[in-house]
Image (cartoon, rainbow, N blue to C red):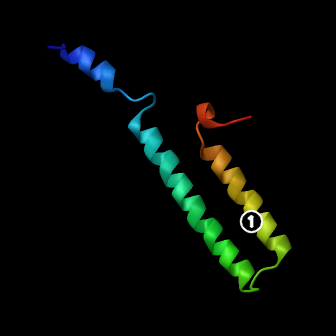
Amino acid sequence: MRSSATQSVAIAPSRPPAASFWTCATAARSAAARGVILDLRDRGEIGDDAFFRLEEELEGTELSATPRDEVVP
């Protein structure tokens, strides 16, 4: 039988669960926002310039919310 210390080390994630939660929440929020701006562009409510500007803002938000160890250079 393993000691409780060994068990906790064996099941400990590589980063805290809160970080994983926020990373997933940010990704879900960004995906939803991206879907909205795609829909707006498809319906002609915004043009390409506005679409690309919003895309850049979303990418900046995603990068600033992504933990450094998850950013691929």
41 relative position to 2: left or right: right
**Number of numbered labels in the structure image:** 1
User: Please, which residue is most extreme toward the right here?
Assistant: 49
Q: Which residue is drawn at 25% across and 20% down?
A: 7
Where is residue 66, by image quadrant?
Answer: top right
Instruction: Work out whether 41 lies above or below 24.
Output: below
Q: Which residue is drawn at 19% across and 18% down?
A: 4
Image position, residue 16 (x, y; %): 42, 33
Q: Which residue is drawn at 24% across and 15% down?
A: 5
User: Please, which residue is most extreme toward the front here?
Assistant: 1
Q: Residue at x 69, y 36 (%)?
A: 72
Q: Which amino acid does label 1 sit on?
A: Leu
16 relative position to 3: left or right: right
Instruction: Work out whether 48 lies above or below 62.
Output: below
47 relative position to 35: left or right: right
Where is residue 35, by image quadrant?
Answer: bottom right
The quadrant the C terminus occupies is top right
Instruction: Work out whether 13 lies above or below 5.
Output: below
Instruction: Work out whether 72 lies above or below 47.
Output: above
User: Please, which residue is most extreme toward the left here?
Assistant: 1
Q: Circle 1 sits on which residue?
A: 54
Image position, residue 12 (x, y; %): 35, 26
Image position, residue 11 (x, y; %): 31, 26
